[in-house]
Amino acid sequence: MMNQIKIADTTLSDAKSSLSFKQKLEIARKLERLGVDAVELPEIGTTKADSLLVRTAASFVKHSVLSVAATTSAEAVDRAAEALGTAAHPRIRIELPMTASIMEYTLHKKQHKMCDYVTMMVTKAKSLCDDVEFTAVDATRAEEDFLKEAVRCAVEAGASKITLCDDAAILLPDDFAMFVDRITEVIEVPVGVLCNNKNGVATAAAILAVKNGASCVKTSIGGEATPLRDFGALIKDIRENYGITAAIRTTELHRAIDQIEWIISGKARGAVAREIVDDGVRLSLNDTVDTVRENVEKLGYDLSDEDIAKVYDEFLRIARKKNVGVKELDAIVASSALQVPETYTIENYVINSGNKISSSAQISLNRQGRTVQGIAIGDGPIDAAFHAIEQIIGRRFELDDFSIQTVTQEKEAMGNALVRLRVGGRIYSGTGLSTDIIGASVRAYISAVNKIVYEED
């Protein structure tokens, strides 16, 4: 029987994050799609933007738990509960320091008063939300007798789970695992761990804690906690030998994290050119259909056997001339899989752009003999064009990927655009070829939209 470990991601839990509102939401979307068990957000302050972020995230985070911290006061618990009102799986996270110096500095409380505060905060949260977590911050530097008492108070007050943190990374993995075992030996609620990775051993500490009974690991992308990339890859490698698994989609792990790291670095994706990461994979004529299918799944596609057969036939045609990398394989999927009758065709488009005007697009499409038109502005000519198409279709699509490549070298070079749209967890891709990169992009977008419309109809 497999032991399924919960993964709670803390990437968005830093209240001082410099990420924009839009970037935070995009990261939350990708974490939800990746299959993490919980997406953690910081304590809600008094600004409307803090509450709005939680409310907006709650509108699309439907499978993962949406967890909001509360530390400073009972009012913080009220704000968390109110913002989580529409969440499918809400959780209030009571995060409290367990070392005397931090207690006094952040909460102005002595150790002998802290257990009363733990009880008050957890009781308050439990009255507003069924799922309440007590997180013992800096637990490994606390006095163990006091820590055990604080944990006991939290559980008696209604905490449904406990998390122990090694924020200072002062314990080696085996010692941390034994520490978790000691603190929770009489605790009957699930126990999670948060390990700081500043010494590079957080993944080892977390997995040893799991072997000692921990049921949840807190991870991060680009943060201080156990790296999600490393922990997810480790679970995939050891699951057969140790019977440990997790709900995350390991076939999408590296790609999704690459995208999130790209957003965090300040290069948030929108309708802009993006190059698919070339991971060095080269497929040859000797590779089987199963190998091609595996690499197609790594790109994020979920294709039927019929479409895989079409992709493999086109792959063999290309592989007779050259080895096939991830870029070529992505283009093969876009051009070979889910080929459908055209619901929409392009009649004409007019794009205006310049360094002193806002980019705008006017696009006319033909749908079953009827001309429909859309006009929109955007951050650039391609962004404007995509918005105009969405206006015509009457809905917005999640842009999973967009890239442009030149396919000829002469002066009038041909450009090939690839667009990948995600709807309901599935990816639909389209390609477009033109000497005009905007025209190629519009054709690619329409190609992907036609596949979505055909399948939904």
Image (cartoon, rainbow, N blue to C red):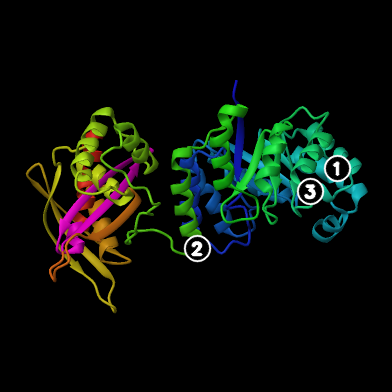
Q: Nearer the viewer, residue 457 or 31?
A: 31
- Residue 31: percent from the left, percent from the top? 50, 45
Q: Describe the element under mark 1 as helix, strand or loop.
A: helix
Q: Earlier in the sequence, mark 1 or mark 2?
A: 1
Which quarter of the figure is the C terminus placed in? top left
Amino acid at dot 3:
Leu
Q: Is the C-beta separation of discs 1 and 2 under 8 Å? A: no
Task: Please tell me whether mark 2 sits on a helix, a strand or a loop.
Answer: loop
Q: Name the outermost residue toward the front.
A: 286
Q: Which residues are magenta?
A: 414-440
Q: Main secondary structure of the magenta part?
A: strand
Residue occupying image coordinates x 29% and y 79%: 356
CA neighbours of label 3 inside 10 A, class few (<14), some (14 to 19), many (20+): some
Which numbered disc flags the more N-terminal residue, 3 or 1? 1
Image spot of residue 418 (x, y percent): 26, 52
Q: Nearer the viewer, mark 3 or mark 2?
A: 3
Residue most extreme to the bottom? 356
**Residue of label 3:** 171
**Residue 249 or residue 296, whichever sits in front:** 296
Residue 339 quadrant: top left
- Furthest residue in direction right, as rendered: 112
- Which residue: 70% across, 55% down? 199
Q: State the separation of the CA atoms marked 1 and 2.
A: 37 Å
Q: Disc 3 and disc 2: Cα gap in Å?
A: 30 Å
Q: Would residue 292 be visible to someone looking at this image?
A: yes
| Residue occupying the far left of the picture | 369
Q: In the displayed structure, does residue 422 sit left or right of residue 22?
A: left
- Residue designated by label 1: 147
Q: Is residue 98 visible?
A: no
